[in-house]
Amino acid sequence: QVQLVEFGGGLVQAGGSLRLSCEASGNIFSIGTMGWYRQAPGNSRELVATISSDGTTNYQHAVKGRFTIARDNAKNSISLQMNSLKPEDTAVYYCRAQGIRLQWSFTSAWGQGTQVTVSS
């Protein structure tokens, strides 16, 4: 059983900053790609940023230069530093882990989501 627990989120004014964290727990040998996705009301879930086990990152165009994803492989955790936040960044943010190697199998997981609200 793998669980992803997210921390951070909240309410911030436009132009402000927030930091999200996510930690995976369970009998994990390794994790492939981890990332953050978000879903605003009425919209489908979209990729925000991902980071592979070797540190390769990928960002949605709208957040490039404002958001930074980082990873600690030893702790099976990632973070998302969000700067210069805009009202359109308002969404529920989800942590995602793919290619989770367990003792005898592979799996993937989603976190429960954390709300980020940016006021104008």
Image (cartoon, rainbow, N blue to C red):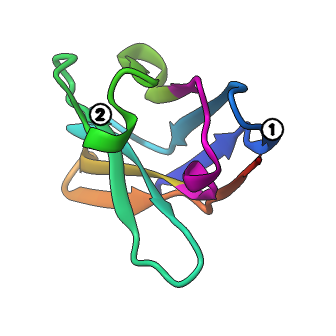
Compare residues 2 and 119 and report the one nearer the observer. Answer: 119
Numbered range of the magenta stretch: 80-93
Compare residues 109 and 80 and report the one nearer the observer. Answer: 80
* Magenta highlight on residue 82: yes
Q: How far across and how far down the image is residue 6, in percent?
A: 64, 44
Q: Are marks 1 and 2 in contact (CB under 8 Å)?
A: no
Q: Which mark is residue 24?
A: none
Residue occupying image coordinates x 19% and y 57%: 105
* Magenta highlight on residue 87: yes
Mark 2 surroundings within 10 Å by alpha-carbon count, few (fewer than 14), some (14 through 19), many (20 or more): few
- Amino acid at dot 2: Phe
Tell me: residue 48, above or below residue 19.
Answer: below
Figure quadrant of residue 114: bottom right
Q: Nearer the viewer, mark 1 or mark 2?
A: 1
- Amino acid at dot 1: Val
Q: How far across and how far down the image is residue 37, in percent?
A: 42, 54
Tell me: residue 92, above or below residue 61.
Answer: below
9 vs 60, left or right, is right
Residue occupying image coordinates x 62% and y 62%: 112
Figure quadrant of residue 59: top left
Q: Which mark is residue 29?
A: 2
Residue furthest front as drawn: 120
Q: How far across and how far down the image is residue 47, in percent?
A: 32, 54
Q: Secondary structure at mark 2?
A: loop
Residue furthest bottom as drawn: 42
Task: Count the numbered circles shown.
Answer: 2
Residue occupying image coordinates x 43% and y 42%: 27
Mark 1 surroundings within 10 Å by alpha-carbon count, few (fewer than 14), some (14 through 19), many (20 or more): some
In the picture of the structure, the residue carrying the numbered disc 1 is 12
Compare residues 18 and 15 and report the one nearer the observer. Answer: 15
Identify the mark nearer the N-term, 1 or 2. 1
